[in-house]
């Protein structure tokens, strides 16, 4: 299996919505933007022409490492325009292989650099030809003589390329990277498949999605599984890293999720699968998923069934309407049995520093 986006049944590249629709025969959810009254769950507030009192904003975009693109999407000389962390960004790769992530707009007269070209290890603006190196510094104004102004630069972001992903560091206060991202042991290891890629975009707050992992009660009501409790689950933290262990006694599976900041995680089910998940906020209400599945040789033959189990009707797809329609309560009314939500929020608060 190759490290590529999974095709649809018809063999064409899937859309963002296609990539979360189950492939096992279930009907996809109704498109509620065109559905009539009574045809389904409530339409998300952002899709209604109303102004409502008291609807809280989701939390801001947290600081951390995020995936902006698969490495394979950014070839030498290529330029990509991508919206992430509430910003328009541009990704480009030089002929030497160096990848850069910068803000999208030229400091000169505001042209979008996504229409530019890569030349001599730098990005040339399509409007007046200014060139910016991989740090965002202007290195040429082709029609002007004299010193280049110090302010002639584009904000850039620290970049880390590993495990088939281009990662970039975002910090609202401009601080340097505060932790390292571990490598995925299964990638390229003997006895394991190549990465099987899954992509999607969802209406969801990043913190709501992350909090889901310690919300043990929802497994029963959303996913149709036995309710977990403290005797079958553990949540531990170590600085910007956290670990969630969940043991499902009904089928004997144990899930261990290692989280590296707010945007990256590794889910391991021993002898069954490993999933490297990159979840990147587009804005406060939308996220982009880039998940790589690694399967041991013994389970490769049933790859589609395994991936549909994680992303289909009883997995990710069951959570989608909840995240889409819920609000974020900063002071939720919690009761015994809700799981370590309070502990999770104390840990997560560190990623809002500098605001």
Image (cartoon, rainbow, N blue to C red):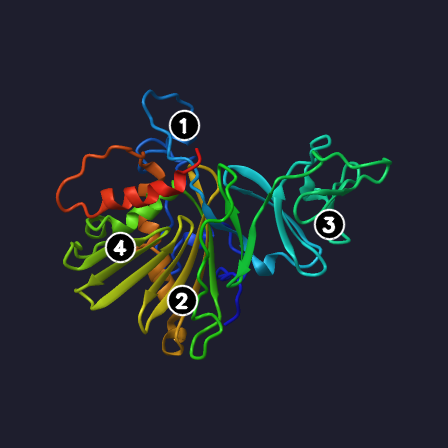
Residue 238: x percent and y percent? 32, 54
- From this view, report whether residue 42 is shown above or below residue 116: above
Cβ–Cβ below 8 Å for labels 4 and 3? no
> Mark 3 packing: few (<14 Cα in 10 Å), some, or many (20+)?
many
Q: Earlier in the sequence, mark 2 or mark 1?
A: 1
Q: Nearer the viewer, mark 4 or mark 3?
A: 4
Cβ–Cβ below 8 Å for labels 3 and 2? no
Q: Earlier in the sequence, mark 4 or mark 3?
A: 3
Measured Cα–Cα span from mark 4 to mark 2: 32 Å
Q: Nearer the viewer, mark 4 or mark 1?
A: 4
- Quadrant assignment, res 271: bottom left
Residue 106: x percent and y percent? 69, 36
Q: Which residue is mark 1?
A: 48
Q: Nearer the viewer, mark 3 or mark 2?
A: 3
Measured Cα–Cα span from mark 4 to mark 1: 40 Å
Q: Residue at x 24, y 48 (%)?
A: 215
Q: Earlier in the sequence, mark 3 or mark 2?
A: 3
Dot label at residue 122: 3
Q: Earlier in the sequence, mark 4 or mark 1?
A: 1
Observer able to see residue 320: no
Q: Between residue 331 and residue 351, name the one nearer to us.
A: 351
Q: Is residue 39 left or right of residue 218?
A: right
Measured Cα–Cα span from mark 3 to mark 2: 41 Å
- Quadrant assignment, res 308: bottom left
- Helix, strand or loop at label 1? It is loop
Q: Which residue is mark 4?
A: 236
> Mark 2 packing: few (<14 Cα in 10 Å), some, or many (20+)?
few
Measured Cα–Cα span from mark 2 to mark 1: 36 Å
- Helix, strand or loop at label 2? It is helix
Residue 291: x percent and y percent? 44, 58
Q: Which residue is mark 2?
A: 304
């Amino acid at each position: 299996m190759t490290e590529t986006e999974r095709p649809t049944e018809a063999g064409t590249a899937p859309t963002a919505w296609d990539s979360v629709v189950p492939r096992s025969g279930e009907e996809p959810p109704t498109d509620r933007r065109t559905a009539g009254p009574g045809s389904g769950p409530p339409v998300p507030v952002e899709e209604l022409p109303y102004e409502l009192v008291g609807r809280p904003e989701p939390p801001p975009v947290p600081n951390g490492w995020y995936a902006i693109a698969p490495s394979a999407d950014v070839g030498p000389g290529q330029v990509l325009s991508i919206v992430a962390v509430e910003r328009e960004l541009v990704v480009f790769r030089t002929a030497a292989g160096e990848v850069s992530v910068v803000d999208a707009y030229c400091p000169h007269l505001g042209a979008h650099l996504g229409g530019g070209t890569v030349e001599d290890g730098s990005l040339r603006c399509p409007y007046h030809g200014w060139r910016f190196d991989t740090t965002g510094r202007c290195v040429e104004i082709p029609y002007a003589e004299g010193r280049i102004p110090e302010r002639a630069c584009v904000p850039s972001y620290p970049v880390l390329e590993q495990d088939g992903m281009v990662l970039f560091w975002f910090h609202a206060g401009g601080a340097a990277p505060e932790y390292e991202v571990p490598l995925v042991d299964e990638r390229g290891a003997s006895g394991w498949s190549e990465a099987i890629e899954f992509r999607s975009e969802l209406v969801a707050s990043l913190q709501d999605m992350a909090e889901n992992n310690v919300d043990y009660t929802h497994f029963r009501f959303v996913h149709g599984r036995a309710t977990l409790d403290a005797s079958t689950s553990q949540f531990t933290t170590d600085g910007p890293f956290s670990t969630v262990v969940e043991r499902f006694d009904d089928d004997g599976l144990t899930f261990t999720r290692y989280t590296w900041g707010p945007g990256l995680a590794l889910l391991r089910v021993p002898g069954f699968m490993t999933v490297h998940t990159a979840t990147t906020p587009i804005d406060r209400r939308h996220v982009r998923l880039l998940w790589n599945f690694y399967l041991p040789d013994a389970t490769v033959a049933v790859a589609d069934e395994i991936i549909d189990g994680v992303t289909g009707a009883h997995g990710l797809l069951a959570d989608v309407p909840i995240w889409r329609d819920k609000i974020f309560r900063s002071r939720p009314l919690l009761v015994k049995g809700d799981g370590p939500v309070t502990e999770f929020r104390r840990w997560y608060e560190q990623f809002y520093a500098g605001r």
